[in-house]
Image (tube, rainbow, N blue to C red):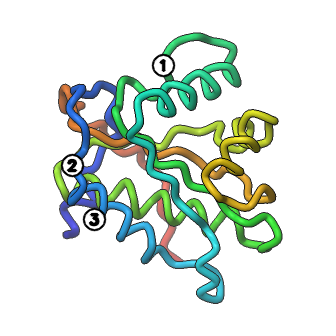
């Protein structure tokens, strides 16, 4: 288990093969068990495997960056994490969900990467329309997207920077 935490890397090239139900369900289950302040369990996840919806999300995310490149690196599955901004710890709680998704994916031999700009995506009228379509309360705001799939290549480990730990 500990080795999974040390060897996880962000994957930025994916095979087109879709993530099967059993593995997706296991990753999502890990997200449900992320810690939240006072066990509020307010963050939600929307797993998107439908290609048209996935491509819409990609276009929305790319627009925030001012590009037309695929910010999801060809990953066939996107898990959108959203949280209730009425909770004082909404960003922290949603971030812990994303962390669990990334670590679970690696433990299950799937590639993953945290993609930012979900807040900007779901603060738009198009994003609000998707929330309504999905049945997510409109007040919820984006935390991030976890892209998921089979890695097309394994990235080389990068050394950790020195001077980042103080023991007192």
Query: Circle 2 sits on which residue?
Result: 20
Query: Circle 3 sits on which residue?
Result: 26
Q: For residue 70, which numbered disc appears in the image?
A: 1
Residue for point 71% across, 39% down? 127
Foreground residue among 49 and 154: 49
SS for callout 1: loop
Residue 8 percent location from the top left of the image = 28, 50
Foreground residue among 36 and 83: 83
The first of marks 2 and 1 along the sequence is 2
Residue 62 percent location from the top left of the image = 61, 21
Q: Please state if 83 lies on the left or on the right of 80 as rendered.
A: right
Q: For residue 120, which numbered disc appears in the image?
A: none
Mark-to-mark CA distance, 2 and 1 = 22 Å
Vertical arrangement, residue 38 with respect to residue 63, above or below: below
- Residues under numbered marks 2 and 3 in contact, where contact means CB atoms less than 8 Å apart: no
- Residues under numbered marks 2 and 1 in contact, where contact means CB atoms less than 8 Å apart: no
Foreground residue among 107 and 83: 83
Foreground residue among 7 and 111: 111
Mark-to-mark CA distance, 3 and 1 = 26 Å
Q: How crowded is mark 3: few (under 14 residues within 10 Å), some or many (20 or more)?
A: some
Vertical arrangement, residue 115 with respect to residue 22, above or below: above
Q: How crowded is mark 2: few (under 14 residues within 10 Å), some or many (20 or more)?
A: few
Quadrant assignment for the N terminus? bottom left
């Amino acid at each position: 288990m500990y080795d999974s935490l040390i060897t996880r890397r962000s994957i930025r090239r994916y095979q087109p093969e879709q993530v099967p139900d059993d593995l997706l369900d296991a990753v999502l289950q890990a997200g449900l068990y992320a810690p939240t302040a006072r066990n509020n369990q307010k963050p939600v996840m929307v797993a998107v495997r439908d290609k048209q919806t996935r491509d819409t999300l990609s276009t929305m995310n790319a627009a925030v960056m001012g590009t037309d490149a695929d910010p999801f690196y060809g990953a066939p599955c996107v898990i959108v994490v959203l949280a209730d901004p009425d909770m004082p710890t909404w960003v922290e709680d949603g971030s812990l969900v994303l962390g669990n998704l990334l670590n679970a994916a690696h433990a299950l031999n799937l590639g993953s990467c945290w993609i930012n700009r979900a807040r900007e995506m779901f603060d738009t009228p198009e994003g609000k329309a998707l929330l309504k379509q999905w049945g997510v309360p409109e007040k919820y705001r984006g935390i991030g997207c976890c892209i998921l799939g089979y890695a097309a290549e394994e990235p080389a480990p990068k050394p950790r920077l020195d001077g980042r730990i103080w023991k007192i």
